[in-house]
Amino acid sequence: MVGRDAYIAVYILTDRMRGTLYIGVTSQLSRRMWEHREGVRDGFTKRYGLKRLVWYEPYEDMSNAIQREKSLKRWPRDWKINLIERENPHWSDLYDSLA
């Protein structure tokens, strides 16, 4: 996980530990997280209050990131939970780590 500079990433948001999950991809993770947290865009994350960044994976190439996002979205829920808990067992909000 890298610093605040703009970079491509696949990420997972939630509202609480083992809560509703959202998987997304962006070219600017810190900006996109600000949008989620401020409710700038209408949609799934705003509707369900998903503001906690619990996992992200940086990429050099957007096409690889999109491929990974699509793959993760097809995973069973328990696989996604295991992915999060391997790196973030307490489901801490990683937003501040972007700074």
Image (tube, grey):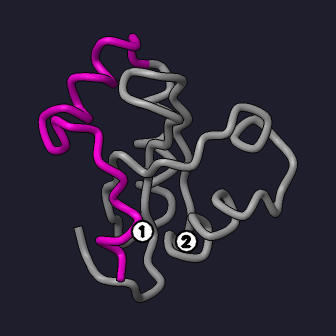
Q: Secondary structure at mark 1?
A: loop
Query: Which stretch is magenta?
Result: 75-99
* Residue at 36 percent of width and 53 percent of height: 93
Identify the residue under disc 1: 61
- On the image, the x and y values in percent for residue 83 come to 23, 31
| Mark closer to the observer (2, 1) | 2
* Within-10-Å neighbours for mark 1: few <14, some 14–19, many 20+: few
Above or below, 91 against 53 in this view is: above
Q: Secondary structure at mark 2?
A: loop
Query: Which mark is drawn over residue 77?
Result: none
* Within-10-Å neighbours for mark 2: few <14, some 14–19, many 20+: some
* Residue at 43 percent of width and 78 percent of height: 7
The C terminus - image quarter: bottom left
Q: Is residue 80 left or right of residue 14?
A: left
Toward the viewer: 48 or 41?
48
Above or below, 46 against 29 in this view is: above
Q: In the rendered structure, which amino acid carries the disc numbered 1? A: Asp
- Please report whichever mark, 2 or 1, sits nearer to the chain's N-terminal start: 2
Based on the picture, tell me whether residue 56 belongs to the magenta stretch. no
Toward the viewer: 72 or 87?
87
Q: Which image quarter: residue 20?
A: top right
- On the image, the x and y values in percent for residue 64 come to 41, 55
What kind of secondary structure does the magenta stretch mostly adopt?
helix
* Residue at 39 percent of width and 84 percent of height: 4
Based on the picture, tell me whether residue 81 belongs to the magenta stretch. yes
Give the Cα distance between marks 2 and 1. Answer: 9 Å
Query: Which mark is drawn over residue 27?
Result: 2
Q: In the rendered structure, which amino acid carries the disc numbered 2? A: Ser
